[in-house]
Amino acid sequence: MELDLLDNALESLLFVSGDGLKISDIADLLGLQKSEINAAIKRLKDKYSGQCGIHLISYNGKVQFASNPDYADTVSQILNPIKEKALTSATLETVAIIAYKQPITRLELESIRGVNCDYVVQVLLKHNLIEVVGRKDVIGKPLLFGTTDEFLKRFQIDSIKDLPDYEQLLENIRVISANEETEEKGLYHEFELPAEEEVPEFLQGEQLDKIEAPLDEKDDKSDT
């Protein structure tokens, strides 16, 4: 297949699909080598980049068209101002831990964070950033959580292997959490990155606003 024809066909396919398509599936259906599809994807990424309103993103062996994140505020204001709410600092901290430690239970999360995680886990599930991936083979069979493809898309990560250094990130969390414990008391200790700390690349662009948890949140909620 000629290069221009392949690029145009792939471009049309991705546009019509809307969702992420597996590169291996595209190659099989078109009867081409995976290397040929990857080359076409690279050319399309060059075409849809920079200031272009549409970008071509890849994650977990899939490829998909997405809006340019530089215009996210404008798009959300016009299409649906309340659909995409900023994640709180607590949810960012929690999803980072899940990403590095998955699969992980809620109790293991709480052991690391030192606070109840029922509320933030529900928020992450609602945003489809994490999902239940099984149950741990211990007494009670607690749910195990892992990140989703939506997590990879949200933070523009091709693979979990592309995450920044875990130990450095957790050390930042420990320092900030310790400082906050001396300043305020409440149901949750929010995680704030100080201005001088470098924000991990996959969290950059996320607004760290606080959302107060409902006062009637119970610590004895079921894992289900």
Image (tube, rainbow, N blue to C red):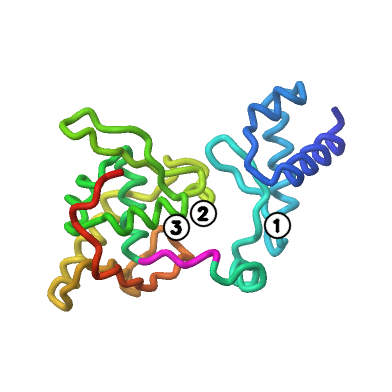
Work out whether residue 167 or residue 216 is closer to the camera in this orientation and state it.
216
Under tag 3, what secondary structure? helix
48 over 41 or under it: above or below: below
Q: Are marks 2 and 3 in contact (CB under 8 Å)?
A: no
**Which residue shows up at 19% across the image and 56% down it?**
219
Q: Position of residue 164 (x, y in %)?
A: 38, 50
What's the magenta bit mostly, secondary-structure-wise?
Answer: loop
Q: Is residue 86 magenta?
A: yes
Q: Is residue 104 magenta?
A: no
148 over 31 or under it: above or below: below
Residue where numbered disc 2 is placed: 154
Q: Position of residue 77 (x, y in %)?
A: 62, 73
Task: For marks 3 and 1, give the CA distance.
Answer: 21 Å
Stretch of the chain drawn in magenta: 83-88
The mark that comes first in sequence, 3 or 1, is 1
Q: Is residue 216 left or right of residue 200?
A: left
Q: Residues within 10 Å of mark 3 (few under 14, many from 20)?
A: few
Query: Looking at the picture, which amino acid does disc 2 mark?
Result: Arg
Residue where numbered disc 1 is placed: 54
Residue where numbered disc 3 is placed: 201
Task: For marks 2 and 3, give the CA distance.
Answer: 12 Å
